[in-house]
Amino acid sequence: MARGFAALTDRGAPRSRGALPGLVVGVLLVLVPLAWWLFGEAGPRSPVPSPSSAAPAAGAATTVGPVPARPVPVPAPAEPVGIRLPGVGVDAPVLPVGVDGSGEMAVPPDVRTVGWYRFGPGPGAAAGSSVLAGHVDDREQGRGAFYRLVELAVGEPVQVQLADGTELGYRVRDVQRVAKSSLPVEELFGRDGRPRLVLITCGGEFDRAAGRFRDNVVVFAEPDPAPR
């Protein structure tokens, strides 16, 4: 099973994108400092992991700096329950996730499900980044929800469904491939500034020695005031 945000199993390297006989999970792991956010002097402030969280895979390495925010839910519209990327054929469910016992952002173990970081702004919030993360692929489960995320083009639509039946429209503003060691965590998880949607998965070359992809694919999308 796929485990953890950006965690990769050590069960083998992924196949080529043409044939998928040995896929591994390619997903971003974001380190969240439990000592400051989740634990006070008297112990944990909230149960972690949540029922939708997943522990990281054995042998997975964390290479991302801490997210600069306490894990306190931000008031926002209803929770996201689905995401559609028509340009690349994605129609996936979304579950709220937090951090796991290792202090890393969790992602649903089902590679076809996307995780929304519930301690940050939600889609439709008045300000800040709403972060959704998904798997690239898995050796056992196959292609993940964000397998084709890197193929998105600027201007393409992103549709997010909320639990109250609302559908929010976004447009892709930028698609980047960033080395894991250089991931701009503060920017990605910011709670201030103009509202936007941030989609993250793994990408680039697979490092067999480390058992993970070298890069992350990051998509930035802005609210579409006039859905087409």
Image: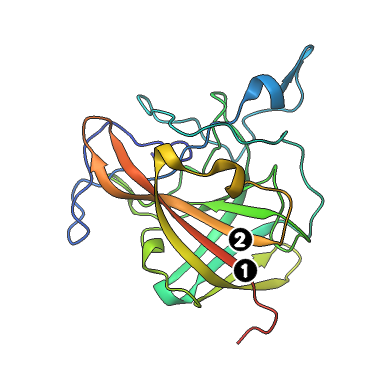
Kindly state the secondary structure of the residue where label 2 is placed.
strand
Badge number at residue 197: 2
Name the residue: 73% across, 33% down. Answer: 70
What residue sits right under mark 1 in the picture?
222
Can residue 25 be seen at all in this image of the molecule? no
Toward the top, the furthest residue is 41
Residue 60, x across and y down, in percent = 38, 29
- Alpha-carbon neighbours of circle 1 within 10 Å: few (<14), some, or many (≥20)? many
Query: Can residue 197 be seen?
Result: yes
**Residue 32 quadrant:** top right
Disc 2 residue type?
Leu
The one nearer the camera, 215 or 91, is 215
Q: Is residue 175 left or right of residue 118?
A: left
1 and 2 marks in contact (CB < 8 Å): yes
Q: Residues within 10 Å of mark 2 (few under 14, many from 20)?
A: many
| Of callouts 1 and 2, the N-terminal one | 2
Q: Which structural element holds mark 1?
A: strand
Q: Is residue 103 left or right of residue 223?
A: left
Q: Decide if residue 115 is on the left or right side of residue 214.
A: right
* Left/right of residue 38 with respect to residue 183 in the rendered view: right
- Residue 90 drawn above or below residue 56: below
Q: Where does residue 68 sit, x and y in percent of width and height?
A: 66, 35
Residue, x 44% and y 29% (percent of image)?
Answer: 62
Q: Amino acid at mark 1?
A: Glu
